[in-house]
Image (cartoon, rainbow, N blue to C red):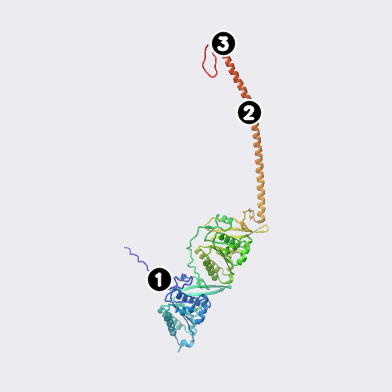
Amino acid sequence: MKKKERPSHRNILPKSPTSIQGLDEITGGGLPKGRPTLICGGAGCGKTLFAMEFLVRGATLYNEPGVFISFEETEKELTANVASLGFDLDNLVEHKKIWLEHIHVERGEIEQSGEYDLEGLFIRIHLAIESVGAKRVVLDTIESLFAVLPNQLILRTELRRLFQWLKRKGVTTIVTAERGEGAFTRQGLEEYVSDCVILLDHRVNDQSSIRRLRIVKYRGSTHGTNEYPFLIDEDGFSVLPVTSLGLNYSSSHERISTGIPRLDTMLSGKGYFRSSTMLVSGTAGTGKTSIASQFAEAACKRGERVLFFTFEESPSQLMRNMLSIGIDLQPWVKKGLLQFHATRPTLYGLENHLTTSIKLINKFEPNIVIVDTINGFMVGENQTEVKTMLLRLVDFLKMKQLTAFFTSLTSETENLSIPDVDISSLIDTWLLVRDLEIGGERNRGLYVLKSRGMAHSNQIREFRLTNHGIELLDVYVGSEGVLTGSARLSQETKDDAEQLLRQQEIGTKQFGLERKRDAMEAQIVVLRSEFQAEEAEALKVITIEKARNERFTQDKIKMGKSRRGDVSIKTTGTKKKKYI
């Protein structure tokens, strides 16, 4: 007999939620409850703010009072530093939600007769926990305790004893530490005795600042292992995870107009898919921003909301420039359907751009997001970081079911189908605009490089920026390719002349046929007249002959009667014989 399978019951590790945006997603619910967590990183990476927000969120959102033990900053300094984040520590301390204490460490206080222990610290922490009924504890920064003691063995023993004591107290603890050379901390020991280790990194590459968070280890729990960008701003600490942005988003079958009728025709007559991602790439001056602006105007006319990120022009300058081609965006700004966000890409780091963009999207709730242009983020050799940032942004937009439109500048000397930032795999519809140089003239051309899920044109179309928007022109192909500008006008003139000549030839032939038809009909009239005259004459003769025959027959009959002969007389119309 088969044994019945017993249902498996998994014991889930209890966790303390942090309510730090994004962090609870990659940790699977928060930090390990009742266990110590190590937050390590270099100076200025946000360790203290991370720990303080964890403590404040616990006290205000989960009714879990906390204790903050600082070994560097005083209570007054801590209160002033976090006030910019909206944390009122004085009020929390007054209501016994948080206990703040600064411990100034001196070598003479912790080292007695060559021995070293943390018994005095245990007593002070115990008093603080009991005073507010704390569930969360922060020790910031732990290196201050051991700066005077080089003995590694004693350090390891004391740290292990400290963490075990905190575990027995049942409090969720955060310990912050400065990162060391070639190790996560200066001592290189904390990661071996902590249940959870989180590394914060603040790096600068090619004058671009980048903040990253990585979970080094998490005992008893699965977690995200990648590096995640994070931001510290007026709203506090926020992390953007990739693990929450998967490929399980739904796809729309709805189509929306590009704002350019003939371009809609090139895209199977219906335009883009809603919630898809578009890219227009090309060299400078080929009309990328103009195409994006006309798409924005068409969306606003449909009553949709558009968020326009511009990294090259101010909103005022962009709207002024678009007026020259008949695109007036100012009314849509006043109606609240169009919002611009203009900054220099070098204003702050990539993760700041990313999180700022996401915050603006969540706040404005647009239907369409336009980014012009993505090349501004390229500084030095940071292509990988830029691509990762754009991947996160595209995944976020798809998750939110938003339509995305990007522009990209390509170099004159490179393959135009390879933009500076290789994000082709993220793009659903890719338009390429290029210069067409024929006969000493420079004109603009456009074609659809790819468009997933729809039939599309493979033609290169010349387009012009007119005073009523973008206009795609008819295709003229010569021996050297697509004809544009004067060559196209010359071809149009030639075609018109040939068309006129053909029309004249057709008119001449039609006129000749008409003349022949008139001559034939005239001949028919003459013949009909002659026939009618001859017919009348013949009928007249026939009538006379019939009358004569009838008269002759009657005369014979009369003559026979008068003679009383026996000659048989034939009567017209009868076979009987009469004898007299």
Mark 2 lies on a secondary structure that is helix
User: Quarter-wise, where is residue 372 in the image?
Assistant: bottom right
Mark 3 lies on a secondary structure that is helix
User: Quarter-wise, where is residue 382 in the image?
Assistant: bottom right
Q: Is residue 392 visible?
A: no
Position in image of residue 47 (x %, y %): 50, 77
Mark 1 lies on a secondary structure that is loop
| Disc 3 target residue | 562
Position in image of residue 40 (x %, y %): 49, 77
Earlier in the chain: of badge 1 and badge 2, it is 1
Look at the numbered discs 2 and 3 and tell me whether their residues touch, using CB distance below 8 Å: no
Position in image of residue 39 (x %, y %): 48, 76
Q: Residues within 10 Å of mark 2 (few under 14, many from 20)?
A: few
Earlier in the chain: of badge 2 and badge 3, it is 2
Front of the two marks 1 and 2? 2
Question: In which quadrant of the rendered image does the N terminus lie?
Answer: bottom left
Look at the numbered discs 3 and 1 and tell me whether their residues touch, using CB distance below 8 Å: no
Give the residue at the far front of this rendering. Answer: 335
| Disc 1 target residue | 12
| Disc 2 target residue | 532
Q: Taking 493 as reference, is 120 above or below it? A: below
Viewer-side residue, 264 vs 211? 264
Three-letter amino acid code at the position of disc 2? Gln
Q: Name the side, left or right, on which 110 lies relative to 560.
A: left
Q: Residues within 10 Å of mark 3 (few under 14, many from 20)?
A: few
Viewer-side residue, 538 vs 480? 538
Q: CA distance from mark 3 to mark 1?
A: 150 Å
